[in-house]
């Protein structure tokens, strides 16, 4: 009997559904026992989000400042395969997920164990995944696979619909005509195919081939334009704003209210003006960067860590 541990944190239940569907092939086999471990913050983030709180979570997300979490409610800490399922906040793993990665318990659970990362996101995840790759390495874990489920709406449409989703908690069509927010039902149920691929490779002791098979099955799709925008925005914009807010105080500190509110005005302008301009530049220069773009797609579809990329 092999033991699989699925660790996750989900606010709306979307990621919970993804993890449970992914693990079905393991659940349906008598050779496996599956344990689900939900990361629980001591003081949870409210869902649906209130406007100010949504932006107040920005500096701690970006600068990877943990919150207090309860130890995972599990019988033992020795598993054969770890599924680390996480969502992304501001191009970083959610604060509760990151808090777990920084915990002593994570060191004990991950040490020398194969790890699969399973993401449920809107569409910007590569910067977060680079950070998670580093943490897994530091914890002594072995990243063997990565699966990314994302919202397939066009970027600006997705921003409108995810905002509707996180501020109301509703997953229906905003104003009756926008596409449904978040990850499609079809993708959420279809994730069990990726669970099947992981199980087969785990059974056959061929985890070194796993990521190539997952990529072939379209478990990860890298969008080069989004990668470029993401990396640029994180380094040049997000880090600067996060440090600017943190100079006035930590999470929930009223002293930083003015700076958080300035960011609330800046954020939509950046999305509506800067992102489309970046897109035009990306398209113009793409023919001259074709080899770099191909290299980036290959790298971000994979599981290796290379800080020179
Ligand atoms: C504060 C906040 C910031 C987010 N930032 C991103 C982001 O940078 N990139 C992304 O792809 N999705 C982002 N999302 C969407 C989440 O990754 C996730 O898909 C959504 O919140 C549903 O997750 P859940 O299962 O925890 O409810 C953000 C969501 C929230 C609440």
Image: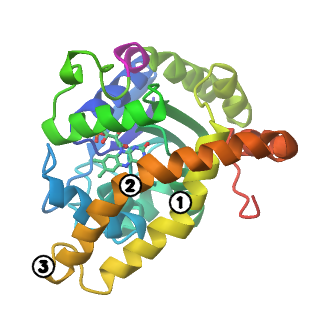
On the image, numbered disc 2 is attached to which residue? Answer: 269
Answer left or right for 218 relative to 177. Answer: right
Quadrant location of residue 256?
A: bottom left
On the image, numbered disc 3 is attached to which residue? Answer: 254
Badge 2 or badge 1: first in the primary sequence: 1
Estimate the spatial distance between the alpha carbons at disc 1 and disc 3, rounded to whole Å. 26 Å
**Residue 176 counted in the magenta span:** no
Which disc, if any, is residue 233? Answer: 1
Image quarter hosting the C terminus? bottom right
The reply to whether residue 167 is visible in this rendering is yes
Pointer 2 and pointer 1: residues touching (CB < 8 Å)? no
Badge 3 or badge 2: first in the primary sequence: 3
Quadrant location of residue 26?
A: top left
Residue at image position (54%, 51%) is 129
Q: Which of 94 and 179 is in front in this view?
A: 179
Badge 1 or badge 3: first in the primary sequence: 1
Local secondary structure at mark 2: helix
Pointer 3 and pointer 2: residues touching (CB < 8 Å)? no
Characterize the magenta stretch by its predominant secondary structure: helix
Q: Nearer the viewer, residue 34 or 94?
A: 94
Residue at image position (62%, 36%) is 223
**Quadrant position of ligand 1:** top left
Pointer 1 and pointer 3: residues touching (CB < 8 Å)? no
Q: What span is in magenta?
A: 184-189
- Kindly tell me whether mark 1's CB lies below 8 Å from ligand 1: no
Q: Residue 165: x percent and y percent? A: 23, 34
Other-residue count near label 2 (Cα within 10 Å), few / some / many at <14 / 14–19 / ≥20 = few
Answer left or right for 269 relative to 211. Answer: left
Q: Nearer the viewer, residue 6 or 15?
A: 15
Other-residue count near label 1 (Cα within 10 Å), few / some / many at <14 / 14–19 / ≥20 = some
Local secondary structure at mark 3: helix
């Amino acid at each position: 009997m092999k033991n699989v541990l699925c660790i996750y944190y989900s606010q709306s239940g979307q990621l919970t559904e993804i993890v449970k569907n992914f693990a079905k092939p393991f659940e349906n086999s008598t050779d496996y026992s599956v344990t689900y471990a939900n990361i629980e913050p001591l003081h949870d983030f409210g869902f649906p989000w209130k406007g100010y709180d949504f932006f107040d979570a920005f500096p701690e997300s970006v600068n990877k400042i943990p919150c207090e979490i309860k130890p995972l409610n599990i019988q033992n800490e020795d598993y054969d395969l770890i599924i680390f399922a996480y969502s992304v906040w501001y191009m970083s793993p959610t604060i509760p997920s990151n808090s777990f990665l920084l915990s002593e318990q994570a060191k004990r659970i991950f040490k020398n164990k194969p790890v699969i990362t399973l993401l449920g996101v809107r569409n910007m995840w590569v910067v977060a995944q680079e950070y998670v790759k580093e943490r897994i390495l530091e914890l002594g874990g072995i990243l063997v696979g990565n699966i990314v489920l994302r919202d397939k709406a066009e970027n600006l449409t997705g921003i409108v619909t995810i905002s509707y989703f996180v501020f109301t908690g509703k997953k229906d069509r905003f104003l009756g005509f926008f596409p449904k927010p978040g990850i499609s039902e079809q993708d959420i149920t279809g994730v069990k195919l990726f669970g099947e691929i992981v199980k087969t490779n785990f059974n056959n002791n061929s985890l070194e081939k796993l990521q190539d098979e997952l990529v072939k099955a379209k478990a990860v799709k890298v969008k080069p334009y989004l990668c470029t925008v993401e990396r640029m925005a994180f380094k040049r914009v997000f880090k600067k704003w996060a440090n600017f807010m943190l100079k006035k105080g930590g999470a929930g500190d009223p002293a930083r209210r003015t700076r958080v509110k300035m960011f609330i005005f800046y954020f939509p302008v950046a999305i509506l003006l800067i992102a489309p301009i970046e897109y035009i530049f990306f398209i113009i220069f793409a023919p001259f960067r074709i080899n770099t773009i191909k290299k980036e797609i290959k790298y971000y579809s994979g599981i290796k860590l290379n800080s020179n990329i």
